Amino acid sequence: MSDQLADSAERLFTAHAGKDVLRAAEQDVFPQALWDAVTEAGFTAAMLPEAAGGFGATVAEAMRLLQIAAAHAAPIPLAETMLAGWWLARAGLAVPDGPLSLAPVRLGEVLTLRAEGGGWRLCGTATRIPWARHATALAVLAEGPSGPMLAAAPAAGFTVTPDANLAGEPRDAITLDAVLPADAVAPAPADSARWRAAGAAIRTVQIAGALSRALALSVSYAQTRVQFGRPIGKFQAIQQSLAILAGQSAAAIAAADMAADALAGGLPPLLVGAAKARAGEAASIAAGLAHQAHGAIGFTREYELHHATRRLWSWRDEFGHEAEWNAVVGRAALAAGADGLWPALTAAG
């Protein structure tokens, strides 16, 4: 990503994703000014090809924008809109305007499509759908008569039962029963495994962003909080904790780079699994260390650390937790065999 684009993103989120916006979002007030600014800047279309309205950014550049947004705990469906639009464009479908999301997101939930008249009827229920109540449309992976299909389902085609994750972000249940025109449905560009892997890659990038913010807050606090006549950052125990926290943040950033490579390279299971599992591990370790460094103030509503750590705890389990993805890595290693493991690892690197 160019320094100019990164600086632009930092300025935008600093200006529009302040504490008041975050508090209001947890009361289910959608930050329209922030969303409008992000849309006007073109960030929502960053993963799209130019023919579909994108501005020619690479997947790595789009993921860096998302990482910056996550560092600011921006309470908007930027990740979901990017990913839903990317899937729709890859299937040759029109990408709707406005906030987007995607369904299903949990293992075992299946939506169905059947031909009806000159179009398609989309049916089923799904849970924990990110930002469904605010979405103008969903990208839906469904089982059709001949295999996986992708549909663009408008908000009028589904009902929402509100729910939320630990961070207060919408994670809603939906019921779909919609008749869609023929041009809103196409053969899916991926199966359910790669659909889930793409979501895991996105969450990996977001974890890296939130973790970088937790690290920055912890270092700043340790430098300014005075105890026993000197900053607590001068104490060896705090220094050790911050060093481990920095190492976990660096690991998460490396995992985010792997996730971006995976998105650009066909979503190989070994690459996605290693990235999401390592980012989830980093989230668990680093969030605890950040709160240890801060003490009680880190848990208060007035202090911003909790916006980062509650997202870390939420995102580490979405689109698969560590155990699930470590199992994927294990199966990939077994499938590669003794002679194929090293080539598989070096190819992933």
Image: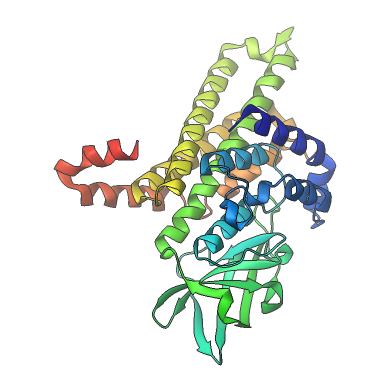
Task: Indicate whether 172 appears above or below 222.
Answer: below
Q: Is residue 321 visible?
A: yes
Task: Give the residue displayed 55% in from the left and 69% down from the top.
Answer: 140
Task: Give the residue displayed 35% in from the left and 35% down from the top.
Answer: 349
Position of 274 with respect to 115 (left or right) is left
Task: Indicate whether 118 appears above or below 332.
Answer: below
Which residue sits furthest left? 339
x%, y% of residue 249?
53, 30
Q: Which is nearer the eye, 41 or 32?
A: 41
Which residue sits furthest bottom? 117
Position of 160 with respect to 314 (left or right) is right
Task: Indicate whether 297 appears above or below 174.
Answer: above
Position of 221 with respect to 83 (left or right) is right
x%, y% of residue 63?
56, 42
Task: Give the residue displayed 19% in from the left and 43% down from the top.
Answer: 340
Q: Quadrant of the N terminus?
A: top right
